Amino acid sequence: MNPTFSDNSQIGMVATFSELVHTDFKGETNALCWFRNLEGDFAAIVNQLQLKENITKVSPQDLLALQLSQKGSIAREIILNDWRLLTDFGASPSLNLLKCYERDEDFDFISTDVYSYHVDRSPITTDTFLCTYHGAASEIITNKQAVQKVQIPEIREQLKALHSGDSAEFEDFLKDNYFDLHYQSLPNKTPTNLGVGHLWRLAVDHPKQQVLPCIHRAPVEKEGEYRLLLIC
């Protein structure tokens, strides 16, 4: 098992899907990892799928239509089983073939795309599940290792200049435009890479959440390599 995971107080380790969905987040732990060393040839799946846009959704029917080797078939069954587990649990998984995400180029002083450290927010009780089967994997960082971008004085002043409403509405302006969801790493802090094949559950900001939401970001993709990511 990866010592980076097991020695990190932010991460809780589980051995089954049932543990993954039923273990409570506590204290500093806001990420749970079902650690797996997966068999199968996931590259074979990626090589047969057709990228139609920078992000292409892949359905179970798309996977079943592929002509795969034995190892490719093993990889396909792992993905389909993860899909079934999450669907039976009540989640709505999406399998994405990724070249890249859209970059946020609206402002030069703050970025709000998924390559920026951010947390997820929901009005209902939920969590984020994700697994990278192929390509670069997402990263997380502890809440102590980052600062909310809207609390950085120079960024906050520029956001105030951007805000045209009453000063009493400024905090609502930050939320409405998702500025408050984004974070900046403190100097010399190293994120944890989530690795390939592990199924993760990350804490989301919602009214009943008992821990701080998990700060994460999408990786910079490797040149010439697509990502295959299951997320919900």
Image (tube, rainbow, N blue to C red):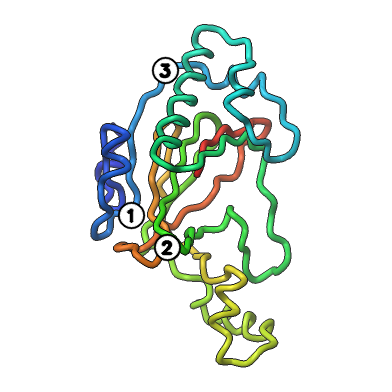
Which residue position is annotated with label 1?
30
Q: Amino acid at mark 1?
A: Asn
Q: Amino acid at mark 2?
A: Asp
Residue at 50% across / 7% down in the picture? Answer: 70
Report which quarter residue 200 is drawn in: top left
Which residue position is annotated with label 3?
39
For numbered disc 2, what is the local secondary structure? loop
Location of residue 215 in the rendering, given as x and y in whole percent from the top left corner: 44, 57
Q: Single out the mark in the foreground, 2 or 3.
A: 2
Q: Quadrant of the N terminus?
A: top left
| Left or right of residue 106: residue 59 | left
Residue contact at pointers 1 and 3, CB within 8 angstroms? no
Q: Single out the mark in the foreground, 1 or 2.
A: 2
| Residue 190 appears in the figure | no
Q: CA distance from mark 1 to mark 2?
A: 11 Å
Q: Which mark is residue 191?
A: none
Q: Which mark is residue 205?
A: 2
| Left or right of residue 52: residue 187 | left
Q: Label 2 crowding class (10 Å Cα cut-off): few <14, some 14-19, many 20+?
A: many
Location of residue 18 in the rendering, given as x and y in whole percent from the top left corner: 28, 36
For numbered disc 3, what is the local secondary structure? loop
Q: CA distance from mark 1 to mark 3?
A: 28 Å
Vertical comparison of 16 with 165: above or below: above
Mark positioned earlier in the residue sequence (2 or 3)? 3
Residue at 50% across / 60% down in the picture? Answer: 118
For numbered disc 1, what is the local secondary structure? loop
Q: Label 1 crowding class (10 Å Cα cut-off): few <14, some 14-19, many 20+?
A: many
- Tally the numbered discs: 3
Q: CA distance from mark 2 to mark 3?
A: 34 Å
Vertical comparison of 110 with 132: above or below: below
Residue at 44% across / 49% down in the picture? Answer: 128
